[in-house]
Image (cartoon, helix red, strand yellow):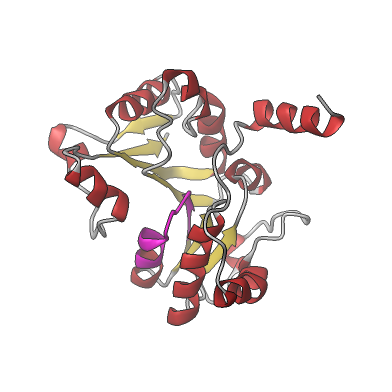
Amino acid sequence: MSPKDDNQERRSRSTEAFFGRRKGKPLRTNQVRLFEEELSALRLDLSNPAPTDLATLYPVAVSRIRMEIGFGGGEHLIHRAVENPETGFIGVEPFVNSMAKLLAQVEARDLRNIRLHDDDATVVLDWLPAACLDQIDLLYPDPWPKKKHWKRRFVSDVNLKRFHRVLKPGGLFCFASDIDTYVNWTLQHVSRNDGFEWLADNASDWLTPYPNWPSTRYEAKARREGRSSAYLTFRKR
């Protein structure tokens, strides 16, 4: 193993880093332009310390900060950013083609309450100051269905500690999935972390989509294949 590969392996173990594809189809000319212009302007600058007040990251006034990890095609993130112009959003997505789709929507709608990161979300979580986020969304993450790959799931003891550090007191961690093993995995991991409480009194609380929920392509695929979804909400104690 080369020194570079060894460093990457150590980083992966220490950060629960991203696993998966970063690029699919070649980008079209306009998508390349979006990366050069839009993403360059919206990408978080992790080379400098994070501002104490994250609201200063945005050119518009925001009163809440919300982070979505792995936003896919961006349907949910765009919907929420339009719906909540007073909220500043941080979107993280390593997959190049998904980022390109989101950038096209940001430009078309002239959204100014979004900042982005196109790499590993754990790096952003470690960069952020403590108690700075009102909400973290992890919606339909890669389930890594084979048991030998479960250690790659983003919900882990290490990352739950990261979530707890950056969420404000009373802040929310919202998780949605159509994979039963991942839902149970998440409940088990959160239950042994006394920093969160599950906000559910009965089955309807976790079977009912979040308010004003925009159906995503992942959810549509799950329904076509006969799977129902779970919507879990946890609050930082």
Q: Residue furthest front?
A: 26
> Can see residue 102?
yes
Q: At 56% across and 66% down in the image, what residue appears?
A: 27
Q: Is residue 172 left or right of residue 226?
A: right
Q: Name the one closer to the observer, 73 or 45.
A: 73
- Does residue 68 show up magenta in the picture? yes
Provide residue 199's location: percent of width, then percent of height.
Answer: 28, 36
| Residue 110 in sight in this render | no
Which corner quadrant holds the C terminus?
A: top left
Q: Magenta includes 183?
A: no
Residue at screen point 62% across, 60% down? 53
Magenta segment range? Answer: 65-79
Q: Position of residue 91 (x, y in %)?
A: 51, 57
Count the marks: how many? 0
Which x, y percent locates residue 71? 44, 54
Horizontal side of residue 156 vs 190, given as left or right: right
Where is residue 103? Give x, y as percent: 51, 70
Q: Where is 232 relative to 9, above or below?
A: below
Q: Is residue 76 above or below residue 219?
A: below
Q: Which one is nearer the viewer's eye here, 7 or 60? A: 7
Front-lying residue, 216 or 82: 216
**Vertical order, 52 against 11 (above or below):** below
Q: Is residue 57 left or right of residue 133?
A: right
Q: Which residue appears at 15% of the width and 33% of the height?
A: 203
Quarter of image, res 5: top right
Q: Is residue 87 above or below residue 160?
A: below
Extreme-right residue of the structure: 3
Residue sitting at x 50%, y 27%: 156
The quadrant of the picture occupied by the N terminus is top right
